[in-house]
Image: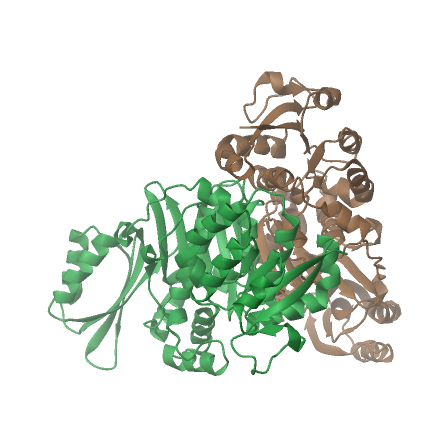
Chain colours: A brown, B green
Amino acid sequence: MEKVKIGLLGFGTVGSGVWKVIEANNNAISKRCRKELEITKILVKSLEKARSAEAPENLFTDKFEDVLSSDVDIVVEVMGGIEPAKEYILKAISAKKHVVTANKQLLATNGEEIYKAAVENGVKVFYEASVAGGIPILNTLKDPLSANQIEEIIGIVNGTTNYILSKMTEDKKDFETMLKVAQDLGYAEAAPAADVEGFDAAYKLCILSSLAFKSSIDVEKVHREGICDITPLDIEYAREMGYTVKLLAIAKKKEKGLELRVHPTFIPSNHPLASVSDSYNAVFLKGNAVENLMFYGRGAGDLPTASAVVGDIVSVITSENSPSYEDSVLGNIEKCDILPIGDLETQYYVRLTVEDKPGVLGKITSILGDKNVSLSTVIQKGTKDSSVSLVFMTHKTSESNLQAAFEEVTKLEGVHKIENLIRIES
Amino acid sequence: MEKVKIGLLGFGTVGSGVWKVIEANNNAISKRCRKELEITKILVKSLEKARSAEAPENLFTDKFEDVLSSDVDIVVEVMGGIEPAKEYILKAISAKKHVVTANKQLLATNGEEIYKAAVENGVKVFYEASVAGGIPILNTLKDPLSANQIEEIIGIVNGTTNYILSKMTEDKKDFETMLKVAQDLGYAEAAPAADVEGFDAAYKLCILSSLAFKSSIDVEKVHREGICDITPLDIEYAREMGYTVKLLAIAKKKEKGLELRVHPTFIPSNHPLASVSDSYNAVFLKGNAVENLMFYGRGAGDLPTASAVVGDIVSVITSENSPSYEDSVLGNIEKCDILPIGDLETQYYVRLTVEDKPGVLGKITSILGDKNVSLSTVIQKGTKDSSVSLVFMTHKTSESNLQAAFEEVTKLEGVHKIENLIRIES
């Protein structure tokens, strides 16, 4: 049987997972491809380091040139980070190698350059593993959902923050405590900003949206807020009102452009996304034909991510003579304006602490009324000291009106602090 | 732009949905295919009937030969039923037309003949819409999950029964009442056996399993039970013990062969499938790399089903030069033995009514003990008359032992009836 030679860039968690999956399932894979997969070169930073999967020593190299000069057919990049991954991918494409990558950060920031190079060189770039690990959402957006205009995508695409929020909800512990637990378990990194501040989710939203809306997306235009300010109190108020708090990556096609935002969100507890707990990921979408659809699965881990990487290798082989998808996205790019966050219209949860004296609530509601912010729920509860916790849930209102109103509210005498402001998805 | 001509067999709910989806989204579709879709012939039973989608009159015909003799590239069969659908599909294949079909009954009973004919004639057969409506599960089993050995599939693949069970659970009403509601809403047919007795789910399980396990499956070998005997009492006991009652289509790969069964099942209420309510469908699967994965969406309806049909049309076009999947399934078929239901090992819920007198429970548990059926839970509740309701939940046990034990139990003096016996999925 003909062999397809693969050069693997990186042999960490995902790279060694790719090795294991091909070892375990090559029989089934080769039946599908009519070709046998063989990893013939593995690029690593250091040849000294112990390896978690047992690949023969002679496959390893610490020089990218060794990979490129060997006659590999497909280059699989699972190193992560912008450089040198970008340089290697562009060199592989110039050398007419197909590329499979799991690199969300690189694609979200430099995707267009890479897709253009692929089209110019007549090779394919597949990147299923870059979003939601093992969940085959990107491939599904290509042919199976191509009869749809995608109207919205709502994703839980970061396992670390979903784990932390799930545990904060179950155990009623605070963010710092649960971050520490997640770090001890290896779910969160020592420098957790990429996850907890929403950067990782924003990269993935970018990639999902560029496929769904066939538009090049500047990740800087994604409105992004992390979960560091979420408290057990907010989660408890959410529960009282029938909601669950999730870090959501949201893209919605509106008449005037695209809404793109990553932020903690109240979502109704009976929404399919609300029950996605622990480190699981899920992507919910609406198409104008298929209606509601949700995909749920492992967003990380060596074998689930490798499932997506090797699935892409198979797709590269079986679709060798099919029209390229990058071309379809780039060649027909729809110019989508990204809407500023102020244009958003949704419901809001706002929690404030105010002085416990008459008239404060009246002044606040009067300012809200002036700015056309109408309230659906007001909860006032005394706290241990002399202050009072005030919680508002608004009807649908414009973000700019709401922000302007609360800017005035903070200046009121007797208003201590706006503790939290969280958008609601209905 | 080059045109792809489509002959549509059937113009009911799905057929008119296909027309609407192509009308609405042809711009996006043609960008993906680099070809424009055009429905050039529509076969209907009667030319007199009013149509729900507005297609030009000159496209309609009541003679299949008109479709075949026109120069269509793809024949789309959305008539349903075995004949004449089978005859038309085989004739289309012989005439070297690609085929897209939504016909689960035909594929579950005559799939092998159709796939073989397709391979012999060098054309493709795609059938995404035959299982779980708009959910792109079959395409996902092809390339995206091809790096996995699928270990199990558990599906809620019949919307009618899921609607009835969901409403029985919410409203605590009985089966007959909720069947009537489903019929009034158009969710269930006047002759409901295909749905409520599990035939429809068995067809779909057959198709799913043949793709997942690359094996030709005889639908007659699927163990099948319907939901007609489920009572609000069973649903209430399930809830008390932390379970939800669902009609599940289950396929599991075991060392000795395949378990294939459709029956009402207790599933833990925190399982992702438990919250799939109303007429929604979902398919949960485990692969040896991807781990747990679930797909959720609309299992029926004109536009969701048409989304799958038109997605298949796109796949036929974009994969024109790719290795055929039918060939992959047929050519490499793994001989899977289908295990008899007696070989099943699982937990069971059993509800009996017995006479309210001392010693009955003791005699029953002694018979169960003799047959190695051990109990995890026993609930005894008095009823309005002089009888007593006894509920057992067993530890994992073999179905043949359990059946043998309860055959003896029914002969005991004082045992009125085994009201229900429901398998538990953990």
Residue B251 horizontal/vertical position (percent): 40, 52
Tell me: B336 left or right of A368. left
> What residue is rendered at 79% in x and 35% in y?
A121
Q: Nearer the viewer, residue A70 or A415?
A: A70
Res. A276 image quadrant: bottom right
- Total marks in image: 0
Q: Nearer the viewer, residue A425 or A96?
A: A96
Say which residue appears at 74% left-offset and 60% top-offset. Answer: B28
Q: Quadrant of residue B360?
A: bottom left
- Residue A53 position, x and y percent, is 55, 26
Q: Quadrant of residue B32?
A: bottom right
Is any part of residue A174 visible from this angle? Answer: no
Q: Is residue A69 above or below residue B57?
A: above
Q: In the picture, which quadrant includes the C terminus of chain B?
A: bottom left
Q: Nearer the viewer, residue A204 or B54?
A: B54
Q: Give the image location of residue A15, x and y in percent.
A: 62, 31
Q: Is residue A189 visible?
A: yes
Residue at 10 percent across and 69 percent down: it is B413
A298 or A128, nearer to the observer: A128
**Quarter of the image with the N terminus of chain B in it:** bottom right
Task: Tell whether A103 sits left or right of B391.
Answer: right
Q: Is A133 above or below relative to A334?
A: above
Q: Position of residue B103 (x, y in %)?
A: 48, 63
Point out the residue furthest to the left here. Answer: B413
Left or right of A283, for residue A362: right
